[in-house]
Image: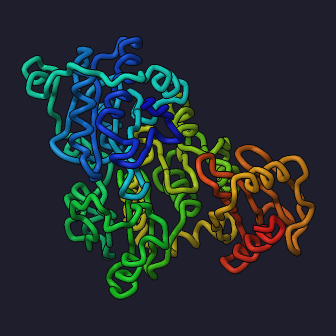
């Protein structure tokens, strides 16, 4: 049987365990990684795995392939988050990071992410170069882990502790722990669980056990997947903040004191306000992906800051953060980054920053959101992922690009922008509808912003009616 062609997607290679994601195919990817790294003169790689099935086995398989090429693998004693790998690369001076994770995908998946020596995602050109070096053949005659240890080609590092030390150096953890509000944390059975139990021992911890099945739930920290966290907050008046992370803890979900979900659009605005007004960080730019609210540009303009809109995918933000000072960067799907840390999404870090903001100001999360609204006006954002036949999906995308709507429902289209999908501005700048295809699934993503939840839903429904989906 011919070997499968392994392709890296937006954030690494992902596949279903025991179908395409096998030990042999992981060895092939590791071989391509080793060949590329040797071309760069690299000799040391941090390898980490999350809480998915057989993470340790796939990690050791990767280390054995790298070891055959004389490359040293730096390993953690147990599962760690993706940001712990990225920070570990920086702190140890390693040349590359590898994370065995499928992030927020369903439990049947695993994956292989590459992290640069700068502490963020490897740039697309480097990922493509690795992909092109993946052989059809499975590497053989590999050394054992014991043999690699004897040769000094395995190093043991406590990357979780390195990360915790970094947190303690950058946050007032005593202030957060002793604040007059309670915190609930949902690990979604992911790799943030151990660190957050240590950082916030008094918090209410949900799904902080090792369970590779994730109880059948994709560990994606969005509102509909976190109803238990919401209910816990609603039933306990002492709890005023809910934090959730995905499987590898690089994304965040947030809940206010009412148990209501707070989306990434609002979190980005909160982070910018905290960094600029309270922490005094005024040098740098604001980077946002195309699907993020334009209110973030509005706040950046009020602060006199430059901003840039990128295609969707954190890798585009990370590329800019590697070269320029960025105060806040983020995407709609929960991947957010700030200055003073690595150029990487980090759900734990962002959660702690919001908790510290609340503790320092003595304000509730809703009070802080109102501060944002006082500056840029209130708004609501939402998204539908609509399953459509692929042919129909691309028809709609082509129409949006070549013959865009003049009206959507009762709204007049006043401007149209194309970058990574198409965004229709409706009756001005505060309302919009955006259409973007999934590159891998028969799914059309329909985003919208309105004044409130009811208007946002009205805009999405009107857009779907126009597109007959």
In the figure, is residue 324 to the left or right of 342?
Answer: right
Residue 379 percent coordinates (x, y):
67, 70
Q: How many marks?
A: 0
Q: Identify whether 57 is placed above or below 29.
A: below
Q: Identify the residue shown where x is 62% and y is 63%.
A: 385
Residue 19 percent coordinates (x, y):
38, 46
Which residue is farthest front? Answer: 1
In the figure, is residue 252 to the left or right of 93?
Answer: right
Question: Could you say which is closer to the camera, residue 384 or residue 334?
Answer: 384
Q: How is the image coloured?
A: rainbow
Residue 301 percent coordinates (x, y):
70, 50
In the figure, is residue 133 to the left or right of 407?
Answer: left
Quadrant in the picture for the N terminus: top left
Q: Identify whether 388 is placed above or below 362.
A: above
Q: Identify whether 37 is placed above or below 232.
A: above
Q: Identify the residue shown where x is 49% and y is 31%.
A: 5
């Amino acid at each position: 049987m011919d070997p499968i062609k392994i392709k890296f997607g937006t954030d690494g290679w992902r596949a279903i365990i025991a179908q395409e994601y096998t030990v042999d195919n992981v060895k092939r990817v590791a071989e391509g990684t080793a060949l590329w790294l040797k071309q760069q003169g690299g000799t040391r790689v941090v390898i980490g795995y999350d809480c998915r099935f057989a993470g340790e086995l796939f990690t050791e398989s990767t280390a054995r392939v790298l070891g055959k090429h004389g490359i040293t693998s730096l390993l953690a004693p147990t599962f760690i988050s993706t940001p712990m790998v990225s920070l570990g690369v920086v702190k140890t001076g390693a040349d590359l990071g590898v994370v065995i994770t499928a992030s927020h995908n369903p439990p049947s998946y695993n994956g292989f992410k590459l992290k640069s020596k700068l502490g963020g995602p490897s740039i697309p050109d480097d990922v493509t170069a690795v992909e092109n070096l993946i052989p059809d053949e499975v590497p053989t005659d590999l050394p054992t882990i014991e043999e690699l240890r004897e040769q000094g080609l395995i190093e043991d590092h406590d990357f979780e502790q390195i990360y915790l030390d970094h947190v303690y150096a950058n946050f007032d953890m005593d202030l957060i722990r002793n604040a007059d509000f309670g915190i609930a944390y949902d690990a979604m059975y992911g790799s943030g669980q151990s660190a957050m139990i240590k950082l916030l021992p008094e918090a209410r911890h949900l799904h902080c056990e090792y369970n590779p099945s994730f109880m059948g739930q994709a560990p994606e920290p969005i509102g509909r997947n976190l109803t238990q966290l919401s209910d816990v907050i609603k039933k306990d008046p002492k709890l005023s903040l809910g934090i959730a992370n995905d499987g590898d803890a690089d994304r965040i979900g947030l809940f206010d004191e009412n148990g209501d979900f707070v989306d990434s659009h609002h979190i980005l605005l909160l982070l910018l306000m905290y960094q600029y007004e309270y922490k005094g960080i005024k040098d740098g730019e604001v980077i946002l992906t195309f699907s993020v609210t334009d209110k973030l540009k509005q706040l950046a303009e009020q602060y006199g800051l430059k901003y840039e809109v990128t295609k969707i995918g954190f890798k585009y933000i990370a590329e800019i953060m590697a070269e320029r000072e960025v105060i806040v960067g983020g995407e709609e799907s929960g991947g957010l980054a700030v200055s003073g840390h690595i150029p990487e999404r980090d759900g734990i870090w962002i959660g702690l920053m919001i908790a510290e903001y609340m503790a320092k100001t003595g304000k509730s999360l809703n009070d802080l959101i109102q501060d944002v609204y006082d500056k840029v006006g209130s708004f609501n954002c939402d998204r539908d992922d609509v399953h459509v036949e692929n042919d129909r999906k691309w028809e709609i995308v082509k129409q949006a690009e070549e013959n865009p709507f003049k009206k959507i429902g009762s709204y007049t289209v006043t401007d149209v922008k194309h970058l990574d999908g198409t965004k229709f501005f409706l009756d001005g700048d505060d309302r919009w509808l955006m259409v973007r295809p999934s590159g891998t699934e028969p799914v059309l993503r329909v985003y919208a912003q309105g004044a409130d939840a009811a208007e946002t839903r009205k805009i999405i429904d009107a857009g779907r009616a126009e597109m007959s989906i």
